Amino acid sequence: MLKKYPALLLTFLAIILARVSIYAQDIPDIEAFQKTDRILILAPHPDDEAIGGAGVIQHALSAGAQVKIVYLTNSDHNELAFIVYEKRLTFRKGEFLHMGQLRCKEAINAMKLLGLNERDLIFLGYPDFGTFTIFSQFWQTDKPFRNLLTRTSSVPYKNDLSFGSPYVGESILNDLKKILLDYKPTKILVSHPADVNLDHKTFYLFLRVALLDLNKQISPVKVYPYLIHCVGWPKPRHYHPELDLVPPKNFLDSQASWLKSNLTPEELEKKHQAILCYRSQTASHAFYLLAFARKNELFGNYPQIELARQASLKEKAPEFFGSTRIFEDSEDEGMLSRDSFIEGQGEVGYAIVDHCLVIRVDKTKKSIKGLSFMLYVFGYNDKVPFSSMPKIRILIKGKKHRIYDGKKKVASPVGFLLDTDSEEVVVHIPLTLLGDPGLILTSLKAYSGRLPVDATGFREIVIK
């Protein structure tokens, strides 16, 4: 019918665009940049800074502020982009290092177009697609992580700040802390804790730990996470400078809050050109990358969760196993609202009960039945170096589980409890297993067989 009535089609599209535009207008603007600001942009890969923050870079420079960019990896693990760009298939170590060097050159050209100099860019050169494994498993070890494609265990790029540094957690954390101490940023843009790309999650995690470690040495910093990788977002694909960038639909019912930064037509065109500087990526992914060149940029984060310690379930919440009462919205101590899961069909809740972190997964929806889960729980204790803290992963399959601390499988400690049925999964994790933390970074990932289905963003839980 719409083919027969083009005017009706145009009206229909106008209504949709109007609704999107109205929603975008409801998002508050990011704080204006000042001449005294020192902006630090943390990019997991060369191109993320252009996709997520090219407009902010221009705004900051126009205000007279300083801007520096730190790249966690040189993005040398993108096999598909290599094949499309180079038009050949290879598994030679040197070819992937060549791709990493090419990405750095593209970053330099893109940022020069936006007004930055090469001296404003810091490349760390850690392993693309390997940094989350480093964060969760490679601390206090003389056997660093080994990159599958480059076959390296230390930073191989001579021009990078971290040349020769082993692929271990201490290397990345120390580099980031040194940069923070030297530059003393007032505002930081960093990849989002709910980004589905593991390197993106990881840079956020390293930043949080670094800021906690430096809490008494630098002034408070405003952090603005930007989202790049989210399934089915943004749509429509390709270059649409007439559209607003709005949050993904599965974030609309979450606790995440958002800010926007509007771009003038001239700034938008510069962003468009900066993205096109990454020819090695646009050769295969222009339809996706250019979808971020829109009328605004988005920055959002979850609020910090504060949980009071509660007494035993029997004393405080006798209906716990028959309801979600202690996880529902409430002003009572120890309560909090739940995280949406599996595209909003399920829920994950948290509490501190009887010296345990309690996490509950609602399984009442058909889409969640039969799934297995990987729970990541990283504790922070300001009296213990983070490198010495446990890095806990818990694999849950039905009524069975396995617990890992880093690369080592560990026995279930006293107080650990897994209760699962057709309705819910409830896991009690003793705080002693987590190193008696005052703060916890945690995320839950769901699998169907070996295929990842969904994951919660990393949440920060403060134990009161």
Image (cartoon, rainbow, N blue to C red):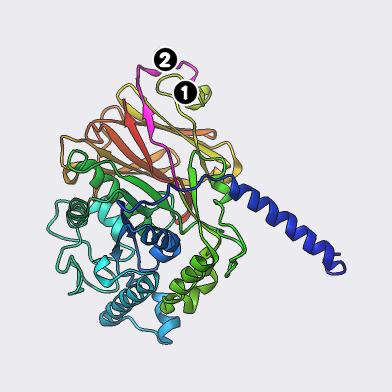
Q: In the rendered image, is residue 2 in sight? A: no
Dot 1 falls on a residue whose secondary structure is helix
**Which numbered circle lies on residue 316?**
2
Which quadrant is the C terminus positioned in? top left
Give the alpha-carbon distance from disc 1 to disc 2, as whole Å: 9 Å
Q: Sequence order check: which comes first, mark 1 or mark 2?
A: 2
Q: Nearer the viewer, residue 147 or 464?
A: 464
Q: Residues within 10 Å of mark 1 (few under 14, many from 20)?
A: many
> Does the magenta segment cover residue 317?
yes
Residue beneath the point at 44% across and 75% down: 281
Residue 363, given in percent of the width and then of the height, sits at: 54, 37
Q: Contact, CB < 8 Å: mark 1 with mark 2?
A: yes
Image height of 184 relative to 326, above or below: below
Residue beneath the point at 26% across and 31% down: 438
**Which numbered circle lies on residue 326?**
1
Residue 416, given in percent of the width and then of the height, sits at: 32, 31
> Does the magenta segment cover residue 75?
no
Residue beneath the point at 59% across and 44% down: 26
Image height of 396 relative to 326, above or below: below
List the single residue furthest toward the left.
142
Residue 121, given in percent of the width and then of the height, sits at: 27, 67
Q: Which residues are magenta?
A: 300-320
Dot 2 falls on a residue whose secondary structure is helix
**Which numbered circle lies on residue 156?**
none
Q: What residue type is disc 1 on?
A: Ile
The image quarter containing residue 439 is top left
Left or right: 172, with 33 as reference point? left
Q: What residue type is disc 2 on?
A: Lys
Which quadrant is the N terminus positioned in? bottom right
Q: Nearer the viewer, residue 18 or 318?
A: 18
Q: Residues within 10 Å of mark 2 (few under 14, many from 20)?
A: few
Image height of 460 relative to 135, above or below: above
